[in-house]
Amino acid sequence: MRKVVVCWLIISSITLSGCWNQLKPDVKPPNGKSDAKASDTGTVVVPRPVEQWQFATGGAITSHPVVYDERVIFGSDDGTLYALSVHNGTEEWRYETDKPIRTKPLIVEDDVYVVGHDGILHVLHAKTGQLQWTFDTGEAQSEMDQWDYYDSSPLLAGDKIVFGHANRMVYAVHRENQNLVWSNRLEAPVKSTGVADQAHVYIGDWDGRVYALHVADGEISWTYKTQGNGRHKAIQANLTEHEGTLYVPARDFLIYALDAQTGTEKWKVTTPAWPASATILDGQLFSGNSNGFSMEALDIESGKEIWETSLSSNVLSAPLSHEGVLYVGTGYAYEGAPIPNHLYAMDSESGAELWKMPSNKIQSTPAIYGQLLLVGDMEGLFTGIRLPIEEPQSVVETATIYSEALGRNMQVEVYLPPEYDTEMQYPVLYMLYGYGGRKDSWFTNLGLDTAADELILSGEIEPMIIVSPDFANSFGVNADVKKGVLRGHSSGADEGLFEDYLLTEMIPYMDKTYATEANKEGRYIGGASMGGFAAMHLAFRHPELFSRVGGHSTSLWYKDSGDLASQKNWLFPTEEEWEARDPLHLAETADIADLQLFIDVGKGDLYASRNEELVRRLKAREIQVEWHLNPGGHSMTYWGDHVRDYLKFYGNRS
């Protein structure tokens, strides 16, 4: 991936400043170096994982993260529940408590349930973090020993939220009316997370007992006492149920398989030390080991070992299984001589190591979103890691076009979607940069290609070709004194027949060279700042060419605007040119009734009121327009935060 800092126009009421800042506060960017290699076809293949972003909390993270609506939600020992954007790690909301949060959040519809170390069940709106209600057990949690990193996480059992407590209680709270339905005091503290089926909740205690509690009333159906191994007897790991069998990793160095209906032991196997929480997939149980420094796969029917792989340090959390790959972190559990910790990717069939990367201590299970692995560590850092792409995905290539209109070669960046097929026809988005930008700015600086990959691969938008041409600082207009086309005073803008080049040379070249949907319905155009002006100008003047147009912080002027007067005078040297070029005027006069429009701007942008006026004029003509007035200004940070919104507009024709 190329990394280039470019200067786009950033506007305040009194100044022009030079460079778009491509980094966001509180987010650690990639290291700027790329190990990507290009194949003979130009397709980029990433050979190893790369840290994409990082967010710092104030305490250790043992809470397992969950993904909801493009957010990753997790707790920290600093007492805060965080919701971050999965794409860039920016904080979307936080909810603060007085004690650590060491449980996995539970998402049910649009609510998130989390039990804090304060002994309180907190229920929040998952999109906003707004508190809905709480249930207070009246007693804080406690640690049973120095390796007790977790509290019992809430689980859904019918219409009840069920969780255990270090005070030996198991609570079932009605998720609608918020009332306590039942509670049951067990024989020992409950720190593990249970599992439920239609009839029972299954949960373990610190003395090594497994309980089956009736979902309806909490009464005990059966109890099973594990073998124990001196002081090693607690059930700290999470329980797992699969097709009527309950799987219980216990601290007595054994993993048990029990009949879920009767509690009868089916099998048990010895492990090198404490087994970690397990994951089940395709007839195999995967569990890490603490002092055994290993991961193993067992046959779920017999308990027979299928494979065992050595790792660098202790494993206390369950691996994440995704598309045949296990992701798990290690975390050395003792003081003294440091032992290196790593994040691993392993083949689930063979246990072979696919890759590993150095890490802080990891004692939680990662989450995944698209090509991003999301993981917290014991130093309080939460990291988004871009996974290797094993097969060719998208490619961004450079095309060179000789322009008769401009009398020179022009270059164009062309994004071809994953699994691009020349026998198909793809819609094309022409995306135009801002003043001072470059043909690669949307990709290199704003990650438009990365966002498109994720949305296409997840099925959120249709595959499309994205074209970002070099059109200098021309605003996309024809302005050439030598050829009799009027222009105004010098402004730093570039003259030339750019409108002719873009419409009569570049678009036909794309349709001839690539597998495009070469018609109005399959052709879109958009841009930011100067690019927004160009997109509106071109689409409004030539609505027969485009079906969708987007203006993102579009540069607009009133006739009496005093800001950037030299550019205004350059664009509009005469009344005739004003009427022919101005998107505000064209919004009232052009035949654009069947165009679909997306217009957005930051509230702090100089052009905010003018974009609002553009929307008002369009709506007065009952022209379809999607309008967004967002927080932010006229900056790369603003555009980068919204590239996915733009792509969803262009790439969703349903």
Image: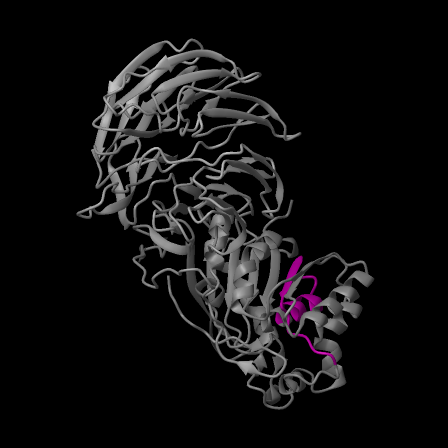
Asked where in the image residue 3 lies, by quadrant, the reply is bottom left
- Front-most of 198 and 103? 103
Drawn side of residue 297 relative to residue 27, left or right = left
- Res. 45 visible in picture: no
Task: Tally the numbered discs.
Answer: 0
In this view, 521 is above or below 145 = below
Q: What stretch is highlighted in magenta?
A: 534-558
Coloring scheme used: one colour
At a point 58% along the width and 47% down the height, the residue shown is 129
Residue 566 is situated, as x and y percent measured from the top left of the image, at 63, 87
Q: Is residue 587 above or below residue 214?
A: below
What x and y, as percent, mark residue 352? Answer: 24, 36
Residue at the (65%, 89%) spot, across then down? 488
Q: Residue at x 45, y 45 (%)?
A: 370
Residue 141 x, y percent position in the rendering:
44, 35
Question: Considering depth in this image, is 559 or 245 the residue closer to the camera?
Answer: 245
Q: How far across and how far down the image is residue 154, in percent?
A: 50, 31
- Would residue 581 be counted in the magenta stretch? no
> Dividing the picture into quarters, in which one does residue 136 lie?
top right
Furthest toward the bottom, the residue is 489
For residue 430, say whether it is visible: yes
For residue 298, above or below residue 619: above
Quadrant showing the C terminus: top right
Magenta stretch contains residue 556: yes
- Residue sitting at the far front: 138
Q: Quadrant of the N terminus?
A: bottom left
* Front position in the image: 262 or 647: 262
